[in-house]
Image: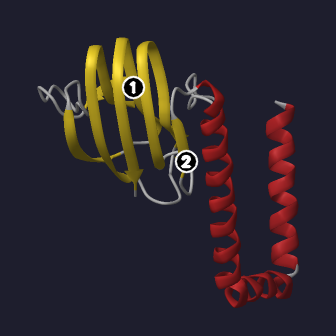
């Protein structure tokens, strides 16, 4: 009840002020009209700042992250960000996963369209090179399951557009011996 009384008194005070001070009210309206482009610009900057902060926050909360350079089997050279670059590796009875490129963003500054060019040589064991997108594995070539990069020897190119959220290029091996050459670019 106190809340409603306070709101009523505030509204009453404002209406008395504005009717008693019509010059003040018209002055405020004129000031708003004169500066509406600046106000719109400030609101757009605020919106972009909030979007950037949210993007950074989302990028920091993923349960995944790219494998650290010292934990990778091969040598990675990152491009303009963690989503693009070059990777060369020789594997010997590798068992596990490497998150080679990627991250978790709502809106990537350089755009969400990427192209992965790969060469995979399998001498023994099994291997899958795939794109992990928001908890779904997209395999990019081979038997063309959803979006298979490859499970077979060969070379190829895979174009894809990342949605917001987790997006990683992952190599999963089981007693894998062979080599991988991978280039991801915008």
Secondary structure type for disc 2: strand
The structure residue drawn at horizontal position 32% and vertical position 29%, both measured from the top left corner, is: 130
Q: Is residue 106 above or below residue 43?
A: above
**Side (left or right) of 159 relative to 92:** left
Q: Is residue 23 above or below residue 80?
A: below
Residue closest to the eye, 36 or 70: 70
Residue 105 can be seen in this image: yes
According to the picture, the residue beneath numbered tag 1 turns out to be 171
Residue closest to the eye, 31 or 143: 143
Q: Is residue 154 above or below residue 12?
A: above
Of marks 2 and 1, the one in the foreground: 2
* Residue 129, percent from left and from top: 32, 28
Residue 135 can be seen in this image: no
**Side (left or right) of 2 relative to 115:** right
Secondary structure type for disc 1: strand
* Residue 118, percent from left and from top: 30, 42
Residue closest to the eye, 171 or 124: 124
According to the picture, the residue beneath numbered tag 2 turns out to be 77
Q: Is residue 19 above or below residue 127?
A: below
- Mark 2 Cα shell of 10 Å, populated few (<14), some (14-19), many (≥20): few
Could you tell me which quadrant the C terminus lies in? bottom left
């Amino acid at each position: 009840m106190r809340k409603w009384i306070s709101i009523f008194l505030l509204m009453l005070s404002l209406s008395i002020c504005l009717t008693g001070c019509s010059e003040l009210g018209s002055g405020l309206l004129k000031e708003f009209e004169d500066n509406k482009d600046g106000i719109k610009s400030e609101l757009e900057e605020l919106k972009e700042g909030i979007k950037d902060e949210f993007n950074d926050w989302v990028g920091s909360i993923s349960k995944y992250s790219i494998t650290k350079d010292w934990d990778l089997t091969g040598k990675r050279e990152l491009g303009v960000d963690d989503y693009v670059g070059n990777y060369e590796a020789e594997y010997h009875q590798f068992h596990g996963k490497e998150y080679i490129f990627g991250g978790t963003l709502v809106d990537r500054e350089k755009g969400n369209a990427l192209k992965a060019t790969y060469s995979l040589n399998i001498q023994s064991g099994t291997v899958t090179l795939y794109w992990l997108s928001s908890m779904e594995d997209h395999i990019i070539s081979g038997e063309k399951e959803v979006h298979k990069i490859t499970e077979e020897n060969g070379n190829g190119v895979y174009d894809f557009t990342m949605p917001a959220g987790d997006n990683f290029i992952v190599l999963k091996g089981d007693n894998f011996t062979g080599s991988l050459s991978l280039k991801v670019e915008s």
